[in-house]
Image (spheres, rainbow, N blue to C red):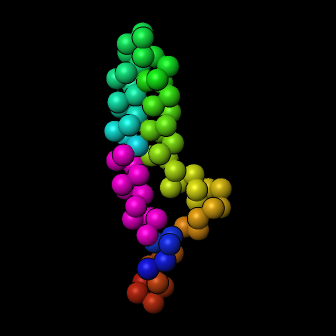
Amino acid sequence: MTFAQLFAMAGYLFNIIGIIVCLVGLHLARRPTRRGLGRGLAVLGFLIAASPLLLQLFGIVEPASPVSPSILP
C-alpha cells in the first residue's frame, strides 16, 4: 500500500474530525466572549477537513491511482 492510498483512506477521518472541530468552533463563536476562539476553531476545522484535497492540489501528495485499466472493459 502506497502513501497516497493510505492518505486517501485517512481522508475520511480528516473530514470527520475537521467537521466536528468546525462545528464546535461555530458553536463557540455564538458567544460574544468566545467569538475569536470560535472563529479560529472553525477555520482550523475547515483546514483539517480540506487538508487531503489541498495537499493533492499543491502537489505535496500525489493522488491515488485509479483502478487498473486491465479490469475495465
Residue 5 picture quarter: bottom left
Tally of marks: 0
Residue occupying the far right of the picture: 58
- The quadrant of the picture occupied by the C terminus is bottom left
Q: Is residue 48 above or below residue 42?
A: below
Classify residue 17 as left or right of residue 53. Answer: left
Q: Position of residue 69 (x, y in %)?
A: 48, 85
* 73 or 35, nearer to the observer: 35
Query: Does 8 appear above or below 72?
Result: above
Residue 64 appears in the rendering: no
The stretch of residues the image draws in magenta is 6-17
Q: Position of residue 40 (x, y in %)?
A: 50, 28
Question: Who's the residue at 50% across and 72% down the image?
Answer: 3
Query: Could you tell me residue 41's position as x and y percent?
Result: 45, 31
Residue 62: percent from left, percent from top: 59, 68
- Tell me the quadrant of the picture where the N terminus can be found: bottom left
Residue at (42, 9) in percent of width and height: 32
The residue under the point 45% across, 46% down is: 49
